[in-house]
Amino acid sequence: MSILQEMQEAVISGNAGKVKECAEKAVAESIEVSAILNDGLIAGMNVIGVRFKNNEVYVPEVLVAARAMHAGMAVVKPLIAAADIQEKGTVVIGTVKGDLHDIGKNLVMMMLEGAGYKVIDLGIDVLSEKFVQAVEEHKPDIVGLSALLTTTMTQMKATVEQLQPYRNRVKVMVGGAPVTQKFADEIGADAYAPDAASAVDKAQELLAS
Ligand code: B1M
């Protein structure tokens, strides 16, 4: 098995120590950073994403795989800037004001990172003004809003409204257990994703549109 296949398997099984070891070995063997990312780390996360979508693995496995992927990312991150690798896009993400739930949002974040996106995490209980500030500062391609409470879904609407002046250059994706496609349409969001793996697919679609 090649070192990249080994790395991929280690991401899938959530073995952070092994992923780190493989990444260090790959760097020492002068394997290109893009190959380490695409054929090792991201490939492993993609497998997990598909399995998660098909209910073959669950939240704990995804979190453990994402943590393992991060261990590898930490090794190659300093080399990414030097290698001038194009990120697929930038996503600013946060859980809306009044809402402290972040497990799902973190999963979405990790899957997006695993798929090659730069993700800026604004955390939880994020005011709509803070999303606007982040759009001005980071110039993302996508703003992701997460909400887990029916009471905080209204904050999504408020945030979409505040982002109106920027909508020609930024797309809005929403998600979270109580959120539906119908609600996303009603508030004028560009996309709704029911789970973390679909969020990656939707991000891809948004960037292509
Ligand atoms: Co709370 N909570 N909670 N809670 N909590 C729920 C959501 C609830 C359904 C439980 C229940 O009553 N059955 C209920 C909401 C009812 C409603 O409004 N519909 C509820 C409540 C009422 C509350 C409190 C009000 C309880 C209280 O204090 N009386 C309180 C509110 C605090 C606040 O936010 N202001 C509260 C607090 C908490 C804890 C802090 C204890 C904890 C959160 C810890 C944390 O997140 N760090 C917590 C938890 C853990 C839950 C449950 C048990 C689990 C949520 C979770 O993490 N699911 C939840 C009940 C349940 O869902 N079974 C519940 C796993 C996660 C992977 O799924 O978040 O849905 P999820 O994310 C998915 C998708 O939704 C999607 O992808 C993710 C991965 O597949 N997704 C996106 C999410 N964001 C996305 C964004 C996208 C795209 C997809 O694009 C940007």
Image (spheres, rainbow, N blue to C red):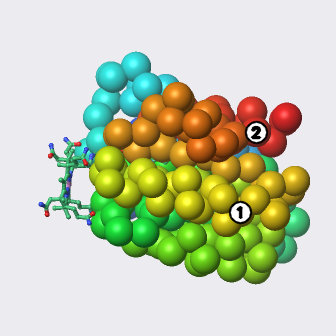
Q: CA distance from mark 2 to mark 1?
A: 16 Å
Residue at disc 2, secondary structure: helix
Residue 115 percent across, percent down from the top left: 63, 45
Residue 169 percent across, percent down from the top left: 86, 56
Q: Residue at x 87, y 66 (%)?
A: 84
Is label 2 within 8 A of ligand 1 (CB to nearest ligand atom)?
Answer: no
Residue 85 percent across, percent down from the top left: 83, 60
Classify residue 193 as left or right of residue 115. left
Residue 121 percent across, percent down from the top left: 54, 69
For the N terminus, the image quarter is: top right
Instruction: Kindly indicate the quadrant of the structure image that contains residue 4.
Output: top right
The residue under label 1 is which amino acid type? Answer: Leu
Q: Residue at x 66, y 42 (%)?
A: 188
Could you tell me how many numbered marks the image carries?
2
Q: Residues within 10 Å of mark 2 (few under 14, many from 20)?
A: some
Looking at the image, is 171 positioned above or below residue 96? above
Quickly name the residue at label 2.
206
Quickly name the residue at label 1.
163
The residue under label 2 is which amino acid type? Answer: Leu
Q: Residue at x 45, y 54 (%)?
A: 154
Classify residue 4 as left or right of residue 10. right
Looking at the image, is 138 positioned above or below residue 31? below
For the C terminus, the image quarter is: top right
| Res 53 seen here | yes
Residue at disc 1, secondary structure: loop
